[in-house]
Amino acid sequence: MIKAVMVMNTQGKPRLTKFYEFLDFWCVVLCSRAENVSNFMEADSIFGPDSRLVYKHYATLYFVFVFDSSENELAMLDLIQVFVETLDKCFRNVCELDIVFNYSKLHTILDEIIFGGQVLETSSAEVMKARISLKLYRISYQNSFWLEE
Amino acid sequence: MGSQGGIGQSKEFLDLVKSIGEARSKAEEDRIVLGEIETLKRRLVEPGIPKRKMKEYIIRLVYIEMLGHDASFGYIHAVKMTHDDNLFLKRTGYLAVTLFLNEDHDLIILIVNTIQKDLKSDNFLIVCAALNAVCKLINEETIPAVLPQVVELLGHQKEAVRKKAIMALHRFHQKSPSSVSHLVSNFRKRLCDNDPGVMGATLCPLLDLINRDVSSFKDLVVSFVSILKQVAEHRLPKAYDYHQLPAPFIQIRLLKILALLGSGDKQSSEQMYTVVGDIFRKCDSSSNMGNAVIYQCICCVSSIHPNPKLLESAADQIARFLKSDSHNLKYLGIDALGRLIKLSPEIAEQHQLAVIDCLEDPDDTLKRKTFELLHKMTKSSNVEVIVDRMIDYMISINDNHYKTEIVSRCVELAEQFAPSNQWFIQTMNRVFEHAGDLVNIKVAHNLMRLIAEGFGEDDDTAYTHLRSSAVDSYLRIIGAPKLPSVFLQVICWVLGEYGTADGKYSASYITGKLCDVAEAYSNDETVKAYAVTALIKIYAFEIAAGRKVDILPECQSLIEELSASHSTDLQQRAYELQAVIALDAQAVENIMPSDASSKEIEIDKNLPFLNDHVERAIEKGAQPYIPESERSGFSNASYLNSQDLHDIPPSHGLRFEAYELPKQPSVPLTTPPISIGSSNELIAVPEPAYDRGNQAAVSVPSSSNSGPAEVKLRLDGVQKKWGRPTYSSSSPSPSAAPSQDTVNGLTVSNGATSVTPAISKGRETTYEPTRKSQVVEISPEKQKLAASLFGGSSKQERKSSLGGGHKTAAKPSGGHGAETSVKKMAVPAQQPPPPDLLDLGETTVATSGPLIDPFKQLEGLLDMVEPTSSTNNHGDVNATKVPDVMASFGDTATAVEHGGNHFSSIEDVDNLMSGLSSATTDVSSDGGIATPQSTAQISKGPNLKDALQKDALVRQMGVNPSSQNPNLFKDLLG
């Protein structure tokens, strides 16, 4: 299962953290790994036994998924891709600032993709549907503008 | 969508985010956040906050938590927000609580009700939000509160709700399988859901369920295969395509399930071959995701009943992965190779060079994965190269966590496949030298045992050669700065045991080295203790051989220093050393027979020598002993009592909390309590009916041998019996000490105490580094490496059995040989201790008067419960009351002989070593510390299992030395 999702920028500032399993402590020092090495790391020493992490570097952001041995590493790497693609669809050319300022929106999207540590939805179109239905709801119920989640 | 500056967010929040973003240091960031916390604390208590503001505050709280600060002061506001009717406020509330709270938080109870209500809502968005929260917040106890609603939602018209309801049920199943075990059929039903999303989600719980119980899902193989087929044929809606691949995540999950279902099941596997083969062929290998699916196929193929054709395509794909430039693919290739290698070992040979490339790759992750692979393919023919590589790598890294792991792997491989003992010792030396602190102490014991026991059935010359080469190597290493403690212990032990054995080195040379060690590592008491004991041995061997002993001046000063040491252990050893030196050759020969460390010591658990006493006691009207099995209630009482230790009257002065035993809730029946009635009134009662204050009801929970000092021993007419139910009275012998002539007591004490007999004998393994140079144009060095790694792979491999079974087998386990050994010991035992030594004993032991010996007081604390019970102090023990002491301890005998505590030490005191034991007696009352002889009996338990049991028992008896001083005789007790 997936244990945690983290997004942080290159300076190590967290931009989003979500844990699906209680982890003792998290101090993420994503070591300065060279460019052309694999995106996988064993993370036992940080996250307890049977943990690995996959990270992907987008511009100024690192996306990190922590999971156990039951998951397929390469698939996780692409799940990051799914997540980012969805964000991209949502924000049109997502950048770090979008993520900083739309913190709760990010969580909503993530909740659609990963649910209780399991991959729930991998089609970004479906994820967007969930968001759209929220939007429709807001319009149809004439909720005040500021209440956008 | 406006993104920057998010709609509805106040300037304050934007400023906060901005200032944190611009913070140059962690300290600055912390300052900003702390300021924010203060602000929020103030704001949140203001009355009449508009909801819009409140929502922002909650988001800010979440933000603070994310930055690693505590926002618990605002949790309650997030909980309140979940009660709001407005969807967006509710969602924010749920988001915040799922991030803030864990499932055991106190506030959950305030949310359960809201969740229940929301699950019934007409608005599916609210239901979804509530399901999100259910997943994170509901724990085992609250599952029943929401379970009916969640089950109902499985039939909801919106697929998004069904999906989440499935996942929520899955979560319940993870938390408490029993709570949803009756709902498994729902998962099966949802597998046929019209919506691919729901079907995909259902695969998660099914994967879990199948993982736990494969057999009950065999009927679904057909369904899974047909789903996989449809997916692979692009039958799902376009929306599920990912980079032109049809629903790869669903494919991966299905392949995982098939791997489980087909494992070891030929019939099921056959149904899968076609579809897996199709995917192999069709899958787009140019994209990341395609490779992920292929990798999963390989995993599946390696797990199900093997099919040559599929294995072939799997091997092809692995080859492609390994040749790829992408490190990710190489990583997967190595991993897949590790899986496939079990089925077709020859595949490794094709890829040997690729594997070696990975081994030399700068990418750490890849390197580690490769070591994992090598670990899997190690055999006797390539163990040397692999372990060598591993150690080199281990030396090069700094990460202690991984270092420990790789060390344990090295040790495991070395023990399992070692081609020769020589090599094993050298390898272990390297491991110890570079990572000694990370090695399990057992490994050190194994090494000592190997050196001591050597080649098993091999001839003596090989023995000696092994030992002297070990001594040589240690003498070379010993000068190196900063050796790890464990390694030094091994070195000291070996030098003490065999340093002078072959006559190559003089005693003074070795002792000089040992003194240097003790001096250089003066902070490490364990090492010093080992060094001193090694000195004792060297001198003892010298004396026994009739040579004159010259004590080096530095050794003399060391002894003097240690006799005044704060550590009672070191003190005792120093006194022992002095005492040994003063003895004559014959006595020394008895105490310290040369090269006896690997002799077995037999223990007769039945303590037949006490039979006489028992019978006499019964004749006098004592009650027969209550069998262990009927004494179950006792332990509880004793623990209750020991928990009351704090209430002990102040007259006892000392209070130590080192005893660990009260924490353990229960004690196995095997813990034999001692029960002694005082003045004939009451005998141990098998119920927990003891009243602490009641001095009549007497029960001594632990094997302490001295009561509170001021309580006079009243043993007249005390009734005692002991022994196990099966106890048979046979050939009583005057005293109990088991064979001493067979044992080099001190030697053993250092050495292989309770060591697993787990040293493998690698001799049978054939080491044939058949070198094949297959590929031309590759650097010869690599080829050589490849050859040594893979060359022997097609050779038949003979695993030498781990665990040195022959050792245990060779020596019949204890118990039976006891009679002989008991007889043998009689000789030294009957020698009256020299008076001067006795005097020596008085100095420390003369605490028969009340309240002097802190250890006794300690005991007193323990025994406070039944003050009259116990045997008295050591003065008496030494003087006259031996049988009584024995009697009172009779029942702890099992524990005693296992754990080595005063019982044995008392024997020793009486029998032989009274002088030597002056310190011992003192120490031993602390529990678990025994004279060398007694320890020797202990250490030579018949096998590992027994040793472990003993150890556990000793712990429960509370006499483990670690409770008082962790270093004390750690080596003795193993």
Image (tube, rainbow, N blue to C red):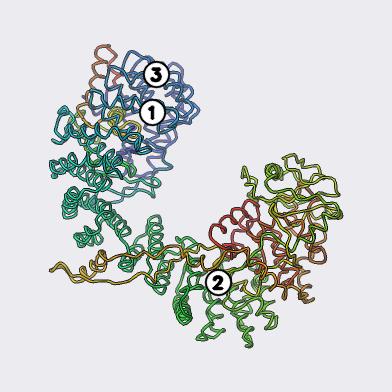
Q: Amino acid at mark 1?
A: Cys
Could you tell me how far apart the alpha carbons at marks 1 and 2 are, in whole angstroms?
A: 59 Å
- Name the residue beneath numbered marker 2: B598
Q: Amino acid at mark 3?
A: Gln
The answer for which chain carries disc 2 is: B
Kindly identify the residue that appears in the image at 32 percent across and 36 percent down.
Answer: B207
Q: Are marks 1 and 3 in contact (CB under 8 Å)?
A: no
| Mark 2 and mark 3 on one chain | yes
Kindly identify the residue that appears in the image at 54 percent across and 57 percent down.
Answer: B945
- Name the residue beneath numbered marker 1: B135
Q: Are marks 2 and 3 in contact (CB under 8 Å)?
A: no
Q: Is residue B178 left or right of residue B910?
A: left
Mark 2 residue element: loop
Q: Is residue B368 left or right of residue B750?
A: left
Closest to the observer: B128 or B542?
Answer: B542
Q: Which mark is residue B679?
A: none
Sequence-first tag of 1 and 3: 1
Sequence-first tag of 2 and 3: 3
Could you tell me how far apart the alpha carbons at marks 2 and 3 are, in whole angstroms?
A: 68 Å
Q: Please, is residue B468 above or below residue B288 in the view?
A: below
Q: Is residue A86 left or right of residue B851?
A: left
Q: Amino acid at mark 2?
A: Ser
Q: Nearer the viewer, mark 1 or mark 3?
A: 3
Mark 1 residue element: helix
- Name the residue beneath numbered marker 3: B149
Report the quarter where the C terminus of chain B lies.
bottom right
- Image spot of residue A1 (x, y percent): 34, 38
| Mark 1 and mark 3 on one chain | yes
Task: Assess disc 3: are there few (<14), some (14-19) or many (≥20) residues with their C-alpha within 10 Å of its C-alpha.
Answer: some
Q: How many marks?
A: 3
Could you tell me how far apart the alpha carbons at marks 1 and 3 are, in whole angstroms?
A: 13 Å
